[in-house]
Amino acid sequence: MPTSTRLAGHTLPDEGRIYRDGYRISNGPAVCSCGVESPSFCSDQGRRNWHRDVHKVGILAGGQG
Ligand SMILES: [Zn+2]
């Protein structure tokens, strides 16, 4: 299995940064470009980790991520 983190159709907008009413916020879920929403995290890093370690790994394993 490649170690690349790229996976067609799955990108994390703004590297996990999220906004509400135009302001950047720290708490909340990210939404992958495929439409799957993450659990709520309190940091961009948490959202990035979810996308890389949970979501894409799940997709590669044949699931919904
Ligand atoms: Zn995705």
Image (cartoon, rainbow, N blue to C red):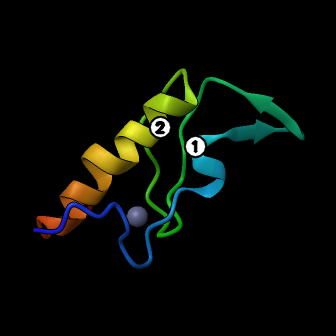
- SS of the residue under disc 2: helix
Residue located 20% across and 57% down the image: 58
Q: Position of residue 38 (x, y in %)?
A: 43, 44
Quadrant of the displayed image that contains ligand 1: bottom left
Position of residue 54 in the picture relative to residue 31 (left or right):
left
Residue located 21% across and 56% down the image: 57
State whether residue 40 appears in this view.
no
- SS of the residue under disc 1: helix
Q: Three-letter amino acid code at disc 1?
A: Gly
- Name which of mark 1 and mark 2 comes first in the sequence: 1
Residue located 57% across and 43% down the image: 16
Position of residue 30 in the picture relative to residue 65 (left or right):
right
Q: Three-letter amino acid code at disc 2?
A: Arg
Is 13 placed above or below 35 here? above
Crowding at mark 2 (Cα within 10 Å: few <14, some 14-19, many 20+): many
Is 38 placed above or below 8 here? above
State the residue in front, 8 or 40.
8
Residue located 62% across and 56% down the image: 13
Label 1 close to label 2 by CB (< 8 Å): yes
- Quadrant that contains the N terminus: bottom left
Label annotation for residue 16: 1
Q: What is the quadrant of residue 39 in the picture? A: top left
Label annotation for residue 47: 2
- Quadrant that contains the C terminus: bottom left
Q: What is the quadrant of residue 6 in the picture? A: bottom left
